[in-house]
Amino acid sequence: MPGLYYEEFDIGMEFHHPLTRTVTEMDNVMFCAMTHNPQPQHLDEEYAKKTFYGQHIVNSLFTLGLVIGITVADTTLGTTLGNLGMTDIRFKNPVHHGDTIHVITRIKDMRESKSRPESGIVTFEHLGYNQNDEEIAYCLRVGLMKIKGS
């Protein structure tokens, strides 16, 4: 299913994304390797046991990317021109290997672009949750969206 065009969004619209994803140890290890992040909290189980979490935690940037990625098919697939920014990012609870992530998106704001008449600006509020419905991530994302026919 393609994403929505600017004019197909409405402020207050809410998406309960059907796509979910279980995070694996390989996801975390590969992401850390690709981003040159050797943080032992993510990669060293013995080190992680000595932290206040008592176990590893998944790289938070992977978590953010996954939360946003889960939303793409329902919102921006093929209809976005790019991200303009992300703010208010928070990680309320850690993600561990084996956690299954689901996401809710709300449309917080929208306006037509002043500098690009073929596009509009949409503010997405993304909330990621684990299998226990505990919030794991939050982000406001501003996207530049195509207007139909442009």
Image (tube, rainbow, N blue to C red):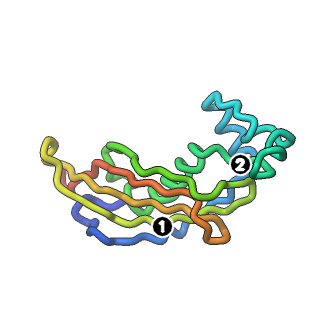
Task: Identify the residue at image location x=65%, y=31%.
Answer: 37
Marks 1,2: beta carbons within 8 A = no
- Left or right for 38, reference 12: right
Q: Quadrant of the N terminus?
A: bottom left
Looking at the picture, how far across and down is residue 114, in whole percent? 13, 46
Q: Which residue is mark 2?
A: 57
Q: CA distance from mark 1 to mark 2?
A: 22 Å
In the rendered image, residue 38, in percent from the top left (x then y), is placed at 70, 30
* Camera-side residue of 8 and 10: 10
Residue drawn at point x = 20 percent, y = 50 percent: 119
Residue at the disc numbered 1: 104
Q: Does 66 sit left or right of 5 as displayed? A: right
Say few, some or many: other residues with alpha carbon within 10 Å of mark 1 (under 14 / 14 to 19 / 20 or more). Answer: some
Q: Residues within 10 Å of mark 2 (few under 14, many from 20)?
A: many
Lateral position of residue 77 relative to residue 116, left or right? right
Q: Quadrant of residue 27?
A: top right
At label 1, the amino acid type is Ile
- Between circles 1 and 2, the one closer to the viewer is 2
Point out residue 56 in the picture as x, y percentages from the top left corner. Answer: 76, 47
The residue tagged with tag 1: helix, strand or loop? strand
143 vs 110: above or below: above
Q: Secondary structure at mark 2?
A: loop
Which residue sits at x=61%, y=71%?
133
The x, y position of residue 143, in whole percent, is 32, 50
Extreme residue in the front direction: 52
Q: Work out whether mark 1 precedes mark 2 in sequence or the reverse, and give the earlier one.
A: 2
Q: Amino acid at mark 2?
A: Ile
Q: Which numbered marker is on residue 94?
A: none
Q: Is residue 86 above or below residue 130?
A: above
Image point (63%, 58%), residue name:
93
In the rendered image, the vertical position of residue 117 relative to residue 13, given as above or below = above
Which residue reaches farthest right?
Answer: 46
